[in-house]
Amino acid sequence: MTENRSLLYNIDWQVFVITILLIVIGLFNIYSAEYKEGSKFFDLNTNFTKQLFFMIPAFVLFIIVLLIDVRFFVNFSYGIYGFVLILLLVTLLIGKEVSGSRSWIPIGIFNLQTSEFAKFATALALAKFLDEYQVNVSKFRFSLIAFGIILIPVLLILLQNDFGSAMVFASFILMLFRHGLSPFYLYLPIVMSVLFIAALVFNITTLVIVIISVSILAYLFLYSKKNSLILIGLIAVSCLAFTYSTNYVFQNIVEPHQRSRINVLLGKEMDLKGSGYNVHQSLIAIGSGGFSGKGFLDGTQTKLNFVPEQTTDFIFCTIGEEYGWIGSLILLLLFSWLFIRIIILSENQKYSYARNFGYAIVSIMFFHYAINISMTIGLFPIVGIPLPLVSYGGSALIGFIMMIAVFLKLDADFKHYYN
């Protein structure tokens, strides 16, 4: 009894309350997105009712996590990781194909997306590895192992043809950066993204002139440093090779629907009835909400089903239309508060495992949040990444609840042990 009182006293209620608020906001908006005049409140064919049902195992797991000895997660991090890798392999063999991705294991009327649990398991394994060896990932050997832990589930998820879920694992770079990873690994994907977009938008000759000019300026600035010419030369050649290969990759490797989405995003196509339809309708829905919105159940774009996938990828449209700028701002502030609070708690941890895990989950959730909202307002191609705790999706809900529950348990117990 004393231990339970101590747990309740030490648990961070700010994180808990924000989590509940985001789930409730999600439920309201899933219901609104599906609402039809005369429809039943409980209907197993609706995503709203399914989400309610998924909340039962989610919160049962939440309570179980809080009751389990904290050493279970520390000691069995690798075991949980290995078990989830086996689940990913099983999914490849017997998984159900949905929207072109074999990412689901059918369980009755529900489908379990195993990649959602892979994020949780990878966070545990990375936290354990970084803590166990007190790793500084600036050292090549340790960074290689850390990237290996991340890349194994990524490869299995890519084999399922689920690019969106695989892309989320790039968020772990933020966690590793906090643990000493060279800024090079953070700058590299940014530079590659800029070059990729530039190669699609600008003339190749112009880009070659820009790359060579920047390289010359960099050499003049760093001429006194040893080996600067070799390093700058290698970077310039790599940039030129990447630039020249971009068009080939884009035309021959990138899927046609993905090409179309990128072209629409870059303004090279105006396909308002095809690839550009979702984003165009999303912008109309969000913009029509104005300052204070049209009110709960009163969103016309929502009611008339103009925006597809409005309970999942485009849930933010419903919020923007029915609650306007004020509602959207409140949602963004809640997420910001959650991220900042988890970072503060992580920084205050005296045990590095808990700190590592905290940074892992905030990286995953921030990546989901940033990409999802960027998709709905036309700043990023549509890749099928849900808004954490808000979008419909039982597997995602359970995965995020488990991550938050484990972090709250680690934080509460280590406060008790160390104080």
Image (cartoon, rainbow, N blue to C red):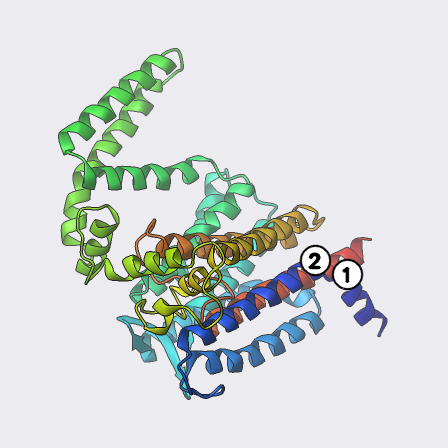
Callouts 1 and 2 close, C-beta under 8 Å: yes
Percent across and percent down for residue 302 are: 37, 70
Task: Compare residues 7 and 378 and report the one nearer the observer.
Answer: 378
Give the residue displayed 62% in from the left and 78% down from the top.
60
Q: Amino acid at mark 2?
A: Asp
Horizontal side of residue 4 vs 348, given as left or right: right
Give the residue displayed 70% in from the left and 47% down from the top.
348
Horizontal side of residue 160 vs 73, given as left or right: left
Quadrant where the N terminus lies?
bottom right
Q: Residues within 10 Å of mark 2 (few under 14, many from 20)?
A: many
Per the image, the residue denoted by label 2 is 411
Mark 1 vs mark 2, CA separation in Å: 8 Å
Could you say which quadrant of the image residue 164 lies in?
Answer: bottom left
Per the image, the residue denoted by label 1 is 10
Task: Compare residues 73 and 208 and report the one nearer the observer.
Answer: 208
Could you say which quadrant of the image residue 411 lies in?
Answer: bottom right
Could you say which quadrant of the image residue 276 lies in?
Answer: bottom left
Percent across and percent down for residue 355 are: 63, 51
The answer to whether residue 177 shows anywhere in this view is yes
The answer to whether residue 149 shows anywhere in this view is no
In this rendering, the answer to whether 124 lies above or below 56 is above
Task: Compare residues 238 and 141 and report the one nearer the observer.
Answer: 238
Give the residue displayed 40% in from the left and 15% down from the top.
225
